[in-house]
Structures are given as structure tokens and as C-alpha cells.
Image (cartoon, rainbow, N blue to C red):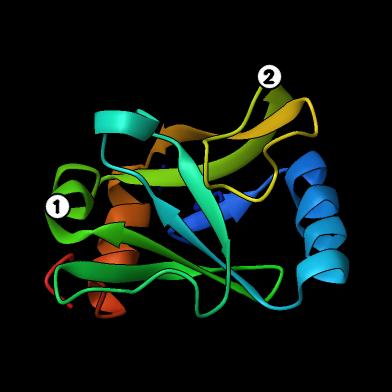
């Protein structure tokens, strides 16, 4: 029996995350996410007004949620290449520079390992962490 493809997008968001993204867009305009790779922010998705975060040569675009680009560092993207990033919202405090800070909620990344057929579909579509 063939594996069923659940959802092979590199990044998706829960309904709670989509609602918060829309709230932040109303307040700040266009946004972008960068999946933090550690250090001061842990490993959290950071939300910024578009143009306030400089995307570097070592960042790659994972995809979009709610019309908002989601980036990740190339090395972290390579480590997570078999994993779908799921943006969620949980109670807590956001990263110091992330726009949800002060709302008593924060964005959280969850991961789901792609099935072999999903990963094959991604590779066939041209996604590799090097691009």
C-alpha cells in the first residue's frame, strides 16, 4: 500500500498562529518570520515587521504562512530537512524582539517528520536546503 501524503508544505501554521499573525499584520503591516537557531532566543520562530530583519546569505526561505515568508538558517534547514515546521501559539512570553512579546502568548515551532513519500515529493519539487 502506498503512503498517503498528508501535507508536504515545508511550513504550516495552526489556527491560533494564523489568528495571531493576522492580528500582528493589522497592527504592524507586512511581516516575516525567522526560525531562530539558538543562543538568546532559544530555538523560537521570531516575528518581525517586514524590513526590520535582514535576511542573510546563509538564510533560506522555507515557505509562507498567511502571506508571510518564513526563513531559517541554512545549517538549521539542513538539519531539519526531513521535518515540517508547524508554527503554533502557546501561553508565555515571546522572544525579546518578536512582535508577539507582551501579549502573554508566544510563537512556538513544532516539528513533524515527513514520510518517505512526502520527502520524495519535496525533493522532486526542487526543495533542498541549499536553495
The reply to whether the C-beta atoms of the residues labelled 1 and 2 are less than 8 Å apart is: no
Residue 66: x percent and y percent? 71, 68
In front: mark 1 or mark 2? 2
Q: Residue at x 81, y 45 (%)?
A: 15
Residue 61: assigned label: none
Per the model, the C-alpha gap separating discs 1 and 2 is 29 Å
Q: Residue at x 26, y 41 (%)?
A: 37
Q: Earlier in the sequence, mark 1 or mark 2?
A: 1
Q: How many marks?
A: 2
Camera sees residue 39: yes
Is residue 15 toward the left or the right of residue 113 in the image?
Answer: right
- The crowding category of the residue bearing disc 2, from other C-alpha atoms within 10 Å (few below 14, some 14 to 19, many at least 20), is some
Q: Nearer the viewer, residue 66 or 33?
A: 33
- The crowding category of the residue bearing disc 1, from other C-alpha atoms within 10 Å (few below 14, some 14 to 19, many at least 20), is some
Residue 48: x percent and y percent? 56, 62
Residue with the mark numbered 1: 78
Element type where label 2 sits in the image: loop
Residue 35: x percent and y percent? 39, 49
Camera sees residue 4: no
Residue sitting at the far top = 92
Element type where label 1 sits in the image: helix
- The answer to whether residue 80 is above or below residue 48 is above
Residue 79: x percent and y percent? 15, 43
Quadrant assignment for the N terminus? top left
Quadrant assignment for the C terminus? bottom left
Residue with the mark numbered 2: 92
Corner quadrant of residue 129: bottom left
Q: Residue at x 31, y 74 (%)?
A: 55
Amino acid at each position: 500500500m502506498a503512503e498517503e501524503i498528508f501535507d508536504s508544505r515545508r511550513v504550516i501554521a495552526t489556527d491560533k498562529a494564523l489568528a495571531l499573525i493576522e492580528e500582528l499584520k493589522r497592527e504592524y503591516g507586512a511581516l516575516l518570520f525567522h526560525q531562530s537557531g539558538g543562543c538568546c532566543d532559544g530555538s523560537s520562530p521570531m516575528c518581525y515587521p517586514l524590513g526590520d530583519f535582514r535576511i542573510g546569505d546563509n538564510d533560506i526561505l522555507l515557505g509562507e504562512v498567511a502571506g508571510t515568508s518564513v526563513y531559517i538558517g541554512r545549517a538549521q534547514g539542513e538539519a531539519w530537512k526531513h521535518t515540517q515546521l508547524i508554527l503554533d501559539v502557546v501561553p508565555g512570553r515571546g522572544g525579546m524582539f518578536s512582535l508577539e512579546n507582551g501579549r502573554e502568548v508566544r510563537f512556538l515551532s513544532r516539528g513533524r517528520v515527513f514520510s518517505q513519500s512526502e520527502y520524495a515529493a519535496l525533493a522532486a519539487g526542487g526543495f533542498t536546503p541549499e536553495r
